[in-house]
Image (tube, coloured by chain):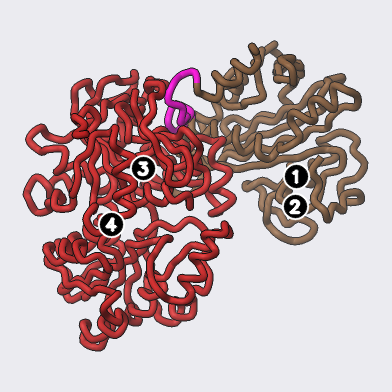
Chain colours: A red, B brown
Amino acid sequence: MRALTFHGTHDVRVDTVSDPEIINPRDAVIKVTSTAICGSDLHLYDGVIPGVMTGDVLGHEFMGEVVETGTDSTLKKGQRVVVPFTIACGGCFHCKVQQYSACDNSNPVEKQDLSATLYGHPMAGLFGYSHLTGGYSGGQAEYVRIPFSDVGPIVVPDHLDDDKVLFLSDILPTGWMAAENADIQPDDTVAVWGAGPVGLFAAQSALVMGAARVIVIDHYPHRLELARGLGADIINFRETDVREALMEMSGGIGVDAVIDAVGMESHGFAIDNMIDVVKQKVGIGADRASALKQALLAVRFGGKVSIPGVYGGMTDKFPIGALMEKGVSIGTGQTHVQKYLKTLLEKIEEGEIDTTFLISHHLPLEDAPTGYKNFKEKQNEWTKVVLRPGMETTT
Amino acid sequence: MSHDTNDRSGGWIGPAIGIGAALGAAAFAYTNTQRKKRDWGDDAPGYTARRGFGEYSVVGRTVTIRKPKSELFAFWRDFTNLPDFMENLEKVAVKGGDRSVWTIKAPAGQSVDVETEIVSEKQEELIAWRSVEDSDIDTEGRVAFEDAPGERGTRVSLIVAYKPPAGDLGRAIAKLFLREPNVQARHDLKRFKMLMETGEIATSARTKDQTRKAKQQQKENA
């Protein structure tokens, strides 16, 4: 099959690789109809996530048609399914309490040691996201092997186009969980750092949950316009003093909830950020966290801090004093996708949530490297790339 | 042998006159079920001590498995199941009379047979075994099953001790097993958990010939 594979920093290629097979009884194989490039794929592209190897098939936002099933799979050939990026067994303690992204059993035993050393406990398995999380072949491919196919994939009705449901795989539940982690109340003013896909969906979710005001912070004009289109207010951090603006816009109280949808590669001119950039470049790998640092200063005492943005390691000069003294609550973690699928599919069917506004480009799978390049370098215009295996190439 | 740097073994273990005697008071006695105070006063399992166990390499690990202990005990008690999750075991043949022969993989496609006997068994709670006299590997192990709090299932604690024999074979076996015994024990127990909770052992392979097992076989055949 054809698949997008990793070859090094800023070097991804579409190669011919072996077709996936059913290996375990609960497996299924799907033929991918749509697959997206995620902002977190750019962390892989930029080489800042350890454990990515040459030849790894990337991609964790995908959907398709079931073409093969193992003896214990509950799926049927021909069904259209969206696949959660988090792999979950459904039988362990974490799955039973719906903390699916912390599944005990989805990361192969021999792959667990590195993340266990980093974090004290091993991570669960994820599709297409480094050997830290299993080294599973990802979704930017023609076919994907789906472990525990009786637990993860959700069958979607035929009348909903791929574009309407594809983001159930990751970024919509991630934005939703980010808002849920911020415990949105009707009188809340919520600030969201980052008008990327997750930030936009977090803003949209916070509004659906009834927040009084949502403010999105970024510097790309087009992305900020998308936020405004959802009903959020916007701040361009290149034009405006963010902290002062947030104090004023929340009536001098400070924002009730902050959502860092930026993560480890944040932009910004703060001196600590620039030092962190240098450290990342020379390979001592401090996570840049300028958005989070700003968010911790902006949140009111007793407020709520939600971190959907991806971090991997350590950061320096962290405002631990503000964190402690302000008595905030913090919500973090990879998304428990399986927990939210049913609710969010209903909201899509009822028209309460429409995520298609985000898609800027459809490309054939063969053009995936162009998609990566532009998603990284032309962030203003390339807001979301959906890849379609089998789509005619234009060139 | 991977003794901790502040190894002060000696007096408190006593001469190694047999693993049971040597380790009984240290690594083996203090599992979760038996929270007696150790002689230095805390409640941690003996095998987490920052000291060594003389000539023996001791590893201990606990996992919590969401299954009733009766089911877990029954699976483990049938020793022929052990190679399903213990990577170093090629096969186990039960001889009867609580004795069985464990065929352990050795370097260069070879294998070593170790005859073991059950020395202690408590229905649904404990299985302890040891190698019989004159075995090439002097080893003893025990696995304990106890109810975990609430709905969490069963805590399974495995403790294994090895004393490698002298000579070339001993060195080869030591190299194979004792290099990272803790890693091996942890991996084996996690595979046991996966098998019990999900019915399968997770693999990220895309094709059948990329699985860990297939690769090991390819290596052996090469």
| A73 versus A360 height, above or below | above
Q: Is residue B31 magenta?
A: no
Please check whether the numbered discs 3 and 1 fall on a single chain: no
Q: CA distance from mark 1 to mark 4?
A: 58 Å
| Point 52% across, 65% down: residue | A278
Q: Nearer the viewer, mark 3 or mark 1?
A: 3
Q: Which label's residue is closer to the chain start, 2 or 1?
A: 1
Dot 1: element? helix
**Which residue does the numbered mark 1 point to in the structure image?**
B27
Where is residue A79, by image quadrant? top left
Q: Nearer the viewer, mark 2 or mark 3?
A: 3
Q: CA distance from mark 2 to mark 1?
A: 8 Å
Q: Is residue B205 magenta?
A: yes
**Which residue does the numbered mark 3 point to in the structure image?**
A86
Residue A51 position, x and y percent, is 52, 43
Q: Is residue A93 visible?
A: no
Overall secondary structure of the magenta section: loop
Where is residue A204, by image quadrant? bottom left
Q: Which residue is at the far bottom?
A: A252
Structural crowding at the residue carrying mark 2, measured as other residues with C-alpha within 10 Å and reported as few (<14), some (14–19) or many (≥20): few
> What amino acid is at disc 1?
Ala
Q: Which label's residue is closer to the chain start, 4 or 3?
A: 3
Tell me the number on the disc at residue A379. Answer: 4
Tell me the number on the disc at residue B12. Answer: none
| A201 versus B139 height, above or below | below
